[in-house]
Amino acid sequence: MAARLLKRLLYRPEGLLVTTFAGLIVVGTVALRLPTSHAGETIGVLDALFTATSAVCVTGLITHDTATEFSRAGQVVILVLIQLGGLGLMTFGALAFQLFRRRVSFQSHAAMQDVFFQGEMRGSLRAALGQIVLFTVLIEAAGAVLLYAGMHVDGPPRGDAFCAVFLSISAYCNAGFSVYSDSAMGLRDSNLIMWTLMALIVLGGLGFAVLFEIRQRLWRRLRRQRGGPVMWTLHARVVLAASFALVVGGAVLLLVTGLTEGETTLSSRVLNALFQSVTARTAGFNTVDIGALPVASLLVLIPLMFIGGSPGSCAGGIKTTSICVWLARVRARLTGQRDVTLGQRRIPQDVVRRAALVFALAALWNLVGVGVLTMSEHVGHHDLRLEQVIFEQVSAFGTVGLSTGITPSLSVVGKIWIILSMFAGRLGPLTIALAVLQEQSAPVFRYPEERVMIG
C-alpha cells in the first residue's frame, strides 16, 4: 500500500508537486531547528515545522516573532524558503537540470505547464522558466530599491538593505513575513513604502501568464510595431477584471464597515482600506491591528482571503478564475442556458467542472477546519470568539497570513491542523486529492437512474 502510494506520488505531476513541497518543508524545519537560526530561546520542532510550512506555502502565519526570535541566519533561511515556495521548487530544479545539460522528465514538464502556464500556451519550457526567473529578479530588485528609499527618505532610517530585500521578496511572493514585529504598521506613514508593497503584491498575484501578456503589449507599444491590436486572452481579461473588482470592492466595503481608531483622517482611512484589501488576497501584511477590526470588517476580509490571487502566481486561495467560472455556471443554470459563457466566450465543460470541484473542496476543507479548531481551541474559553477561528482557518487555507492574534496561543492540535491547511491551500485540495487518490477505471455497468427532490 505504501509502495503504491509512493509510486503515484513520484510518477504523477500532482504527486511530484506534493513531494517536492513536502521535502522542502522538511529541509526548512531542520534548518530552523539549528541553534544559529535562533536569536534567543530554542524553538521547538512543532514551531519550526509551523514556520517552515508557513514560509514554503508563502502564508505568513507565525508562532514566533520573525524579527526578534530568529537570528539573521534564521531570517535568511525563512527568506530562501519564501523564494523557493513562491516560485515553486520545481522551477529551480528544472533550471538546474538545464544548466547541467540534463533532460527534464516528462512528469516535471507536465507539472510545470500545469502550475505556471495555460494549457493552450506553447513554447520552450527552458525559455519560459528563464523569463519567470528574470521577471522575478527584476521586480524584486526594483521593489527593494524603492523600499530602501522609503525607509530612509520618509523620516528617520527604519531598516537596512536586508530589510528592504526581505520585504520585497516577501511581498512579491505574497508571503506576509516581516522583519518588523508589527508587520507593516510602523511603515504606514510612508506613502512610497505603502504603494511599493501594494504594487509588489498585485504583480505577484496576477500570475506569470498575465505578466507575459502585459509585457508583450508594452513591448509592442514601446517599439511602435504596426499591425492589428494585440488581443487579450480570456484568461488575462478575467484575471485583470476580477482582481480590480476585488481590490476596489474590498476597499469600499472596508471604508463602510470601518477600520480602527488609529485612522483619524480620510486619506489615511482610504489608503489603509486599499492596502488591507490588496493584502487580504493572500499577501498577509497589515498596517492596522487586525484584532481590533470590527466583526463586519473581518467578514469582508474572509471572502477576499478565500478567493485569493490568480492561477500561476505566488498567491493562494481558490483563485480569481475559479470564482468567476463558478459564478458564470450559477448564472447559466439560473437563466436556463446550456453553455457557460464568460467574456463572450464559451467555457469548456471540463473547466467548469474543475472550478466547481475546487470551490466545493475548498469550502468543505474550511468547514471541517472550523469544526476542528472550534473543538481543539475550546471556543468560549480562553476568550476566543468564533469569528476569530473562522478568520484564522480561512487565512491559513488561503495562504494569507493575517491573524487576529490567536496563532501563537493555538494548541498542538490546532497548530497541526493549520499546518495541514497551509499545505493544502498552497497546492490546492484538488491537486492533493489527485496525487493521493487512485484513478478509477471506467465501470463495466451503470446503475439505473432515479430522481430526487432538490430545494
Image (tube, rainbow, N blue to C red):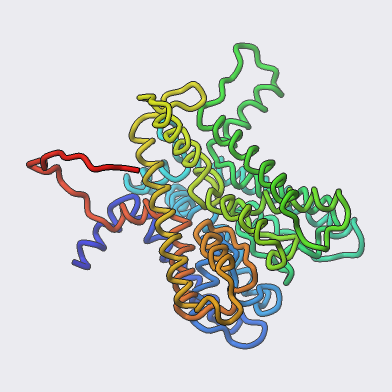
Return the residue nearer the eye: 378 or 127.
Answer: 378
| Residue 385 x/y as whole percent | 58, 71
The vertical placement of 273 against 67, above or below, is above
Q: How many tags in the picture?
A: 0
Which residue is at the front of the view, 171 or 28? 171
Residue placed furthest toward the bottom: 41
Q: Is residue 162 visible?
A: no
Q: Residue at x 56, y 40 (%)?
A: 131
Residue 292 in picture, x, y percent from top left: 72, 67
Residue shown at the point (61%, 81%) measured from the top left: 36
Locate the C terminus and report the quarter of the image it occupies: top left
Report the side of 155 relative to 106 (left or right): right
For residue 79, side relative to residue 19 (left or right): right
Residue most toward the left? 444
- Image point 69% across, 41% down: which residue? 248
Q: Is residue 222 visible?
A: yes
Q: Quadrant of residue 427?
A: bottom left
- Up/down of 346 relative to 26, above or below: above
Q: Residue reaching furthest top?
A: 227
Quadrant the N terminus occupies: bottom left
When the figure is inspected, residue 342 is found, relative to residue 174, above or below; the finding is above
Q: For this rendering, which residue is in front, 166 or 123? A: 166
Instruction: Compare residues 414 and 112 and report the one nearer the observer.
Output: 414
Residue at the (45%, 62%) spot, across then down: 423
Q: Quadrant of residue 81?
A: bottom right
Percent coordinates x, y for residue 25 in the rendering? 47, 68
Name the spot of residue 95 as percent of width and height, x first.
Answer: 47, 49
